[in-house]
Amino acid sequence: MTSPTHVAGERSQDTSGTQEDPNLHVYNTAEVAAHYASLDYLSPCEKTLFDAFLKEGDVILDLGVGGGRTTPYLSRLASRYVGMDYAPKMVAACQQKFPQLEFLVADATNLALLGDQTFDSVVMAYNGMDYLSPSESRQRCLAEIRRVLRKDGVLIFSSHNPRAVFSRPAWNRQKVEEVARQVAGQREWLLEPARLLLLWLRVAVAMAGSAIESALRFSRRVWHSAFWSGDGYMVDPAHGGLLTHYAVPERVIAELEQHGFRFLRFTGDDYPRRSRAFVTDWYYYVFQKTETAAS
């Protein structure tokens, strides 16, 4: 299941001569790489789709691996696992965490290090494809993914929703319960009043935070053509600002079909909650390689 560690040479350009991605300087900072290396979870949406569409013994390419958040789950499932990222500091973090596994430094738009029809599955989690720009880079990435996938191979990736302008209020009920018990101590009669008061306060704070976040999102997105057309680039404020591609599901499906993929399923990142067109931040998609690509 494991392979020797391998790092390819760092590149500032791909072989077609295009300039490196403008987001690379952000992802290749020590601070951002450390942040992603600290993440060690799968979302319910990811686990559901991985369990449904990936098979034990698959040869899996984890493209845009970041700090290795998905590595433990996918590598245990795979007969061969390859993690790839264009940020050398991300790959270095993965090597340190998982020295027995195979990682490559390479750009998703040029997978020349990988042979044709090498992988059963390609996973590009955490919206990695959205940070490729300009749009021609996305097209090259999809063409390369299709090339390295075997017949009927599966692609799982996520992509931002440009119309997610409303933020759901959220709070941790378990934390409220813990604080209520600390406040009540041995006074059992005080537990229920403390629980109700703390819950009311937490809900009020969550509602206020949700209203502020929704107002900020609306003000940032409603003026962009991507919001109205359902497809385009906007700046994601994460990590100081990242040029990011956003697209609604029907546009994503149409794009992938043009590249020779058959749509299987999409699920909101807020699963198991019901997805909402103006609430769900991003969607996970599952596609299967078809025999021929559209012209």
Image: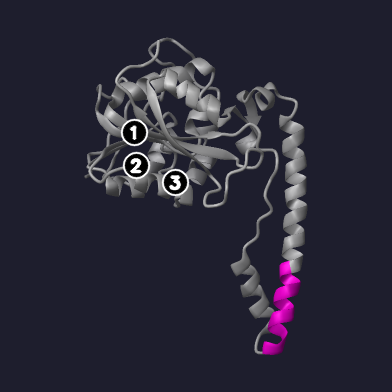
Splitting the image into 4 quarters, where does residue 249 fall?
A: top right
Sequence order check: which comes first, mark 2 or mark 3? 3
Q: Residue 20 colored magenta?
A: no
Residue at (62, 66) in percent of width and height: 173
Which amino acid type is shown beneath numbered disc 1? Val
Question: What residue is pinned by disc 3?
Answer: 46
As drawn, the label of residue 53 is 2
Sequence order check: which comes first, mark 1 or mark 3? 3
Quarter of the figure with the N terminus: top left
User: What segment is highlighted magenta in the picture?
Assistant: 188-199
Vertical relation: 250 (above or below) 143: below
Residue in the foreground of this view, choosing between 218 and 248: 248
Spot occupied by residue 212 in the image (x, y as percentages of width and height): 77, 46
Quarter of the figure with the C terminus: top left
Spot occupied by residue 242 in the image (x, y as percentages of width and height): 60, 30
Spot occupied by residue 129 in the image (x, y as percentages of width and height): 48, 29
Contact check, label 1 and label 2, Cβ < 8 Å:
yes
Splitting the image into 4 quarters, where does residue 54 fall?
A: top left
Spot occupied by residue 110 in the image (x, y as percentages of width and height): 37, 19
Residue at (57, 34) in percent of width and height: 160
Question: In the rendered view, does 236 fall on the left or right side of 40?
Answer: right
Question: What residue is pinned by disc 1?
Answer: 154
Query: Label 2: few (<14), some or many (≥20) within 10 Å?
Result: some
Give the overall secondary structure of the magenta segment.
helix
Q: Residue 191 colored magenta?
A: yes
Indicate the secondary structure of the residue bearing disc 1. strand
